Image (cartoon, rainbow, N blue to C red):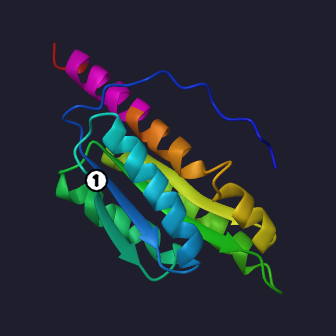
Amino acid sequence: MSLDTPRFQQIDGSGLRFAIVAARYNEALVDTLVQKAAATLVASGAVEPTIERVPGSAELPFAASLLAESGRFDAIIVIGMVIAGDTNHHNVIGDSTATTLQSLSIQARLPVINGIIVVNDHSQAEARAGTTLNRGKEFAEAALAMAVYTKKWKTKKNL
């Protein structure tokens, strides 16, 4: 696992609206990511995020598409934790959701942050959703950066 984290400049999130849609599968791990993401958004000054839950990571793209369609959000963060089992199903979920979320983001012209973590075992999952390193913060920082970026360029387009 890389311990690198992207360099992030503080962003004033005042008035920005976010949704977090998260899987219930591997709920304890996902909950720590959701909590860290939500706390990071609120600390930036953003409105308290709308948090929705779905059964598993495979359902996240559909849920994100409904949230995008609502027009209520400046960005959507999708959070799930997929841990490998005896088959390669985790790869199928990881690949298909990543492709679908990227397509959704482009089609909806809305930042959709892919926070679905795909790992080989439980210890890798815990390492990414723990107290020392918690990728939920990075997902929120990416959402903040992309929401501001989107507003900047949508405004310039209208000039």
- In the picture of the structure, the residue carrying the numbered disc 1 is 49
Q: Is residue 55 above or below residue 111?
A: below
Q: Which residues are magenta?
A: 145-156
The residue that appears at 27% across and 27% down in the rendered structure is: 151
User: Label 1 amino acid?
Assistant: Pro
Residue 158 left/right relative to 51: left
Residue 105 in view of the camera: no
The residue that appears at 49% across and 68% down in the rendered structure is: 31
Could you tell me residue 88's position as x and y percent?
A: 79, 78
Taking depth in this image into account, of 35 and 143 the one nearest to the observer is: 35
User: Looking at this rendering, what residue extends furthest in the front direction?
Assistant: 131
Could you tell me residue 143's position as x and y percent?
A: 42, 40
User: Looking at this rendering, what residue extends furthest in the bottom direction?
Assistant: 86
Say which quarter of the image contains residue 15. top left
Q: Magenta region's main secondary structure? A: helix
Say which quarter of the image contains residue 95. bottom right
Taking depth in this image into account, of 96 and 12 the one nearest to the observer is: 12
Q: Is residue 153 magenta?
A: yes
Q: Is residue 11 above or below residue 67?
A: above
